[in-house]
Amino acid sequence: MQASTEVSLSEQLLEIETVFKQQQAHQYIVANTDASDRIKKLKRLKAVVIRYRDEIKTALYNDFRKHPSEADLTEVYAITTEIKHTCRHLRKWMRDEEVGTPLALKGSSSYIKYEPKGVVLIIAPWNFPVSLTLTPLISAIAAGNTAILKPSEHTPHASSILKKIIEEVFKIEEVALFRGGVATSTRLLALPFNHIFFTGSPGVGKIVMTAAAKHLASVTLELGGKSPTVVDETAIIDTAARRIAWGKYLNNGQVCIAPDHIFVHESKQELFIAKVKDYVKKFYSEDPSRESSYARMVNSKHAQRVKSYVVDAVEQGASVELGGSYKDEEDYIAPTILTNIPAQAEIMSNEIFGPVLPIVSFKDIDEVIDKINSREKPLALYIFSRSKKNIHHLIANTRAGGTCINHNLVHYFNNNLPFGGSNNSGIGKGHGEYGFKAFSNARSILKQHVPNAIELLMPPYTNFKQKLIDFTIKYF
Ligand code: NAD
């Protein structure tokens, strides 16, 4: 078993190197395609994704019992909307961008040309295995790159469909996909890609950035972390509870921008908990383990990780307000709410990435700001409030990749917004024009038409030229 894995890995290494060289050789053909060619490719990709829609849904059910409607919304729609948006705007994004000319350079004109970076690598996680592999690919194609994709090893059914889709739509010298885990990823990362777009955990993000540094490849890192949510005393509690119950338990809490933990004003805590419980019941029935809308943890390792956070918190004195039950054999964790959690509990420092909602009460908004700022910058920060003052105060005094006011998760679906984190939660942005730019080099081009003032300032430097330089510094 061991030996055959080794053989297949070494065969894969050869194949990876061959495909990489083919893509390097082919990159200028892809780079010199116009907007119509790229739009045609994207539309072909969309048509094939739609053709495989049922298979995608079956694959995601087999990988972690994701409900077909949730797969449609969070995987298929996420891809089709990104393709539609890109096709609608690509001509404009690709257009050379004229810029002004300072007085000292009069006689020239300048523009920015968005050229493709070249051969790019896209490494994806398992939580939305199809859309988080294909969404960056849409931007890479729009920008005129060739691409190699590496989906997650933890969702093998989704990876198989992805492979079929890619092989059906693209020639290997344009887009190729390699399945595999850390070994495959490591082999890919050793190659001199021009750009690496990685979506995954901050820990692996550091490994990716270290590998990229060897070739000075540019990176986009879409990472994770703990996204705090604030529900203040002015919030409409029923609405906040409904939206948070949806945002927390969707995909079984395995969402990078899920509300990780909630700060609720102490005067509203009791009502908020009661309402979240009501909505969990409405969404997933009295027994979520029997409700098909409720997905599962992706594997036992992750189920046990999340379970251990709950056990640790309870051992340290936390109260279980809802859930707290498990079915280990099917990686099931009931929708869970915890309160009275000691600050040192693991659940308060690690990204939860599962269906457990810690609730922390507060009196004063500045207390919450201090707590948020004592951690790494989150990927998302959510505010439920009707107080303009509180909303402004929270935004002005915290940092986050993105924020929703009176909602959660949905900013992801606005393709006009950049999507990504800041420092520990990510570097660079994706989606729409921001994704196109992530995969492009903004090349500066200046064309000289007639001699300009600089010609008068070339050596040898005389007193007269120094006077001209003085004049230039003072007035231009
Ligand atoms: P992960 O970092 O473990 O894995 C992501 C990818 O990296 C996989 O393809 C995996 O094979 C590869 N990988 C894992 N270890 C590696 C190593 N040592 N060297 C090279 N490659 C390696 O992440 P995950 O568990 O798949 O996903 C969950 C994490 O991703 C969470 O932290 C979540 O917040 C984050 N995430 C972020 C976004 C975003 O858009 N910002 C989206 C989804 C998930």
Image (cartoon, grey):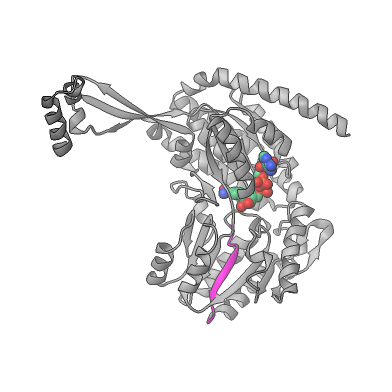
Relative image position of residue 248 (x, y in whole percent) = 62, 62
- One can see residue 182 in this view: yes
Relative image position of residue 39 (x, y in whole percent) = 49, 30
* Viewer-side residue, 261 vs 143: 261
Looking at the image, which residue sits at the far bottom?
267
Residue at the location (49% across, 69% down)? 370
Where, by quadrant of the figure, is residue 314 drawn?
Answer: bottom right
Magenta segment: 258-267
Relative image position of residue 56 (x, y in whole percent) = 68, 42
- One can see residue 127 in this view: no
* Viewer-side residue, 142 vs 222: 222
Relative image position of residue 358 (x, y in whole percent) = 63, 69
Residue at the location (45% across, 62% down)? 398
Looking at the image, which residue sits at the far right?
1
Where, by quadrant of the figure, is residue 334 drawn?
Answer: bottom right
In the depicted structure, whether residue 132 falls above or below residue 274: above
Left/right of residue 451 with respect to residue 52 in the rendered view: left
Left/right of residue 449 with respect to residue 359 in the rendered view: left
Left/right of residue 47 with respect to residue 4 in the rendered view: left
Q: Tell how many labels.
A: 0
Residue at the location (51% across, 45% down)? 427
Q: Is residue 263 one of those drawn in magenta?
A: yes
